[in-house]
Structure formats: structure tokens, C-alpha cells
Image (cartoon, rainbow, N blue to C red):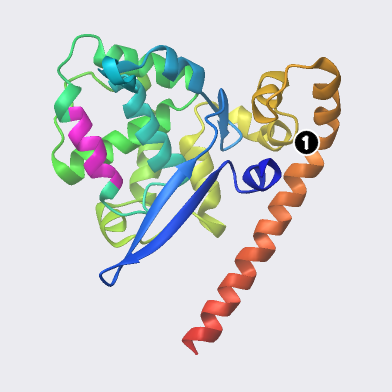
Amino acid sequence: DERWMREEGWHIILAKTVWGKRMLLEFHWPLRRQVMINQLVYLDVQHIWQTAIPLDQENNLWQPAPPAMLLHLCLHTGLQHRFTDLGLRHYVDLDRLVRLHGGEPYFWSSFAELAEQTGAQHAAAFCLRLTESLLGTPLPAGALGPIQPPEWKRRLFTRSIQEQDVLNRTRALYAHRRWRWRVLTADRLWLLWISPLRSLFPGRAYLASYYATQSGFRLAGYALWHPFHVLSRALRRRLRNRLQHRRSVEGAA
């Protein structure tokens, strides 16, 4: 059901209990050409496909190139889960990827270029610095130079998130601390002023990808409809989260 999939953000989570343990399997469908994160960052999925490398060409099995995979992990960790949501798990993934591919030619330069094009330089740098401090990940001297945040932002990050926050999943950057997360992850602070508008009016390329059409007539209609779709979806999710929170409180009582 396309309408339901769009409502759920184009992915579903299946749960199953096996031998007393609950397992989760997450499916994404379809992979859109352009994904917007945090109203500021655009991930070009088409570029990831174009630069993918073969794992098994005979069976048409591919994976993202290591720089793109590293950026994706950083976006997932720093933007979607705000550095501490899922504890150490994401940082173990980052550590393993860097240890496996970090010494390859052009790895870090390609990663820095892709982070800049995506608009996620600072979020990526913070993720990798945390990985280094948590797990001793070997980062070559100067590897993060091109994407390094300014000194004042590094001090703010240190005050906002400590290693123990990742390990214990504490001090999440939500509610009254949300502004810190937005400032820390915005490569260009002036974009924070227009981020709500970018969410409501994301542009032709994003609308074409989101609604899977290239028709100018349809895109014009979707451009008018999209703000109502975004606001109503946000309202429904907030009401649903409040209801779930109320039920969990009542269950605990």
C-alpha cells in the first residue's frame, strides 16, 4: 500500500520472538533517489548506486563504496539517532569500517568530498571523533581536517555529549536540548532559519523522488499538497507517540 508506506517513511519493521528473544528486521522500500534528513541534509541515493562496488557480480550482489557507506553510518548515528540513542552499536560499525578500509587510497578524500556535497561534514566529524575516543579507532592525521567543525562548536559538543552518554544512552539531544543538536549538526548555521521551509517546500527533485513522478502537472499538484501532508503526518505521529507514552506509564503503574 503506497499511501501506508509513505506514512511510515517508506520502511517497515517486523518483529518475531525466537527462543525467548525478540528479533527485529527492518525493510526499506523503495530506495528513493534523494532523501532529506533534518531538513538540511540531502543524501543522493542515486550517487550511492552509481559508485557501488560488486561483492558478487555473477549474482548481481553489490554494496555501497566504503566512503559512501561510512557517510551513511555517520548520518544514521548523528542525525537520525542523535549520537546516543542506540548506544555503542553504531560506533562499533564505524570502527570496523574504518579499520577495514581506512588505509585505502583516496578513501578519506572521497569521504570528505561526499560529506561536503551532502551537507553533513560536522555531523560526520563528531561521529568519528566519538568512535576514536570510545574504541581507539585509528584516524590518520589530517583525515578529518577538511570536515572539521570550528573550535567553538567542538567545545559545545564536548559539553553536550560525553562517552558515558553513549554507553548509557543518557542526555539525549531531544526536547529542550534539541537546539544544541541542530546547531552542532548544521554545517551552515544560516540554514537553520530556512529548515522548516525546506521541509514544507523541498524542491522539484525531492518531490519527484518522493512521489515517484516526473510529470510537471503532477509535481505542481504535489508541491501544493506536500506541506499539508508533512504537517498532518507530524501531528499524527506526535499524537501516536503521546498515546504510546501514556499506555507505557499506565502499564508501569
Task: Give the image quarter of residue 206.
Answer: top right
Considering the image in quadrants, where does the N terminus appear?
Answer: top right
Residue at left 28%, top 34%? 128
The answer to whether one can see residue 148 in this image is no
Q: Between residue 13 and residue 100, name the one nearer to us.
A: 13
| Mark 1 burial class by Cα count in 10 Å: few <14, some 14-19, many 20+ | some
Please, which residue is most extreme toward the top here? 105
The answer to whether one can see residue 186 in this image is yes
Pinpoint residue 146: horizontal percent, then vertical percent: 34, 17
Pinpoint residue 115: horizontal percent, then vertical percent: 41, 21
Residue 64 against residue 161 in the figure, above or below: above
Residue at left 50%, top 24%? 119
Residue 14 against residue 109 in the figure, above or below: below
**Magenta stretch: residue 10 in it?**
no
Task: Give the image quarter of residue 169.
Answer: bottom left
Task: Give the image quarter of residue 63.
Answer: top left
Q: Is residue 29 left or right of residue 224?
A: left
Q: Between residue 70 and residue 133, name the one nearer to us.
A: 70
Pinpoint residue 174: horizontal percent, then vertical percent: 51, 56
Pinpoint residue 102: horizontal percent, then vertical percent: 18, 22
Name the secondary structure under disc 1: helix
Q: Between residue 217 and residue 192, name the one nearer to us.
A: 217
Helix, strand or loop for the magenta stretch, by majority: helix
**Which amino acid type is shown beneath numbered disc 1?**
His
Magenta segment, which residues? Answer: 90-98
Please, which residue is most extreme toward the front here? 58
Residue that badge 1 annotates: 226
State how many labels appear: 1
Residue at left 60%, top 77%? 246
Residue at left 83%, top 36%? 225
